[in-house]
Amino acid sequence: MVRKILARCFIYLMLLLMYLPILILVVYSFTVSDQIGVWTGFSLQLYADLFNNHDLMDAVKNTFIIAICSAVVSTIIGTLGAIGAYYSSSRAKKAIETMTQLPVVNAEIVMALSLAVLVVALSWKFTFFTLLIGHVVLTVAFVYLNVKPKLMQMDPNTYEAALDLGAKPRYALYKVILPEILPGILSGFMISITLSLDDFVITQYLKEPSFETISTYIQKIIAKHPIPPEVRALATLIFVIVLVSVVGKTIYSNHKAKVIAKRKKGGL
């Protein structure tokens, strides 16, 4: 009994330490004070200032453009790679899994420097394309790791049955495999967006000079000036968007699991 109480207290303490700074940031996004800790009254002025700050809004737009583009590319490559590895020989599967582990355990600064050296060696210019490559390299492994468990949970006989019934491999892929692993694909897509939104090192090394994201814009500002108060409003909006997306995905996954359970129960 005492162990359970201590374990719960420890978990609640860790959750408090994780989310208390975010909650404080959210609270002080509704006051116009330049400093966190000084409350000057409830106001939505920071949100108005956010949308009037054109440089920051351009950085937000660039951040979401690169995040969505890299997440789409990473999801496609990671999903196809996971499916290919699942149906490959054991030796090829081990090689693919080893390669996908490297971006996860490797230091981000190492990837950023190596990609920057590669771009210079190939005499390329630092453009949106080089930045996209960097973000895809960063996120594609996480898509693979999210899709792989769903493939392992899938009944392999379903795909074989579709082929035996006359379905072509491509049709069976779209109608049998992809619906089964869709939760893993969505999880990988969301993680890719989150990692891309949060990235600074790779973006700083691979972007063109005029292309600013949220992280590089803030770093550029704080080098000479304090953090603009409207950044608190921006952080709150991003937190709310991510929270709604995660809750929506969880509800969808739970609903799909209940539907599958009902079908299996009805089949019995």
Image (cartoon, rainbow, N blue to C red):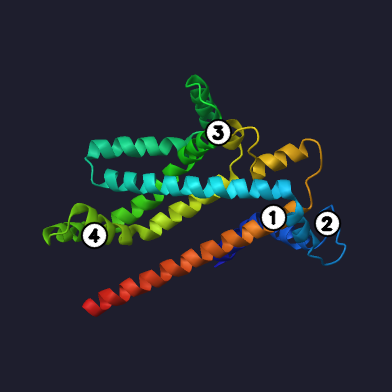
Q: Label 2, on which residue?
A: 37
**Residue 22 locus on image (x, y percent):** 68, 57
Q: Label 3, on which residue?
A: 127
Q: Nearer the viewer, mark 1 or mark 3?
A: 3
Cα distance in 3D space between marks 3 and 4: 44 Å
Say what amino acid the circle numbered 1 marks.
Leu
Q: Is residue 146 visible?
A: yes
- Label disc, if present, on residue 234 of the rendered structure: 1
Cα distance in 3D space between marks 3 and 2: 41 Å
- To which quarter of the image does residue 261 belong? bottom left
**Direction from residue 86 to residue 221 in the image, left or right:** right
Question: Height in image: 175 above or below 60?
Answer: below
Q: Residue at x 23, y 42 (%)?
A: 88
Label 4, secondary structure: give it.
loop
Cα distance in 3D space between marks 1 and 3: 26 Å
**Label whose residue precedes the other's in the sequence (4 or 2):** 2
**Residue 148 locus on image (x, y percent):** 34, 50
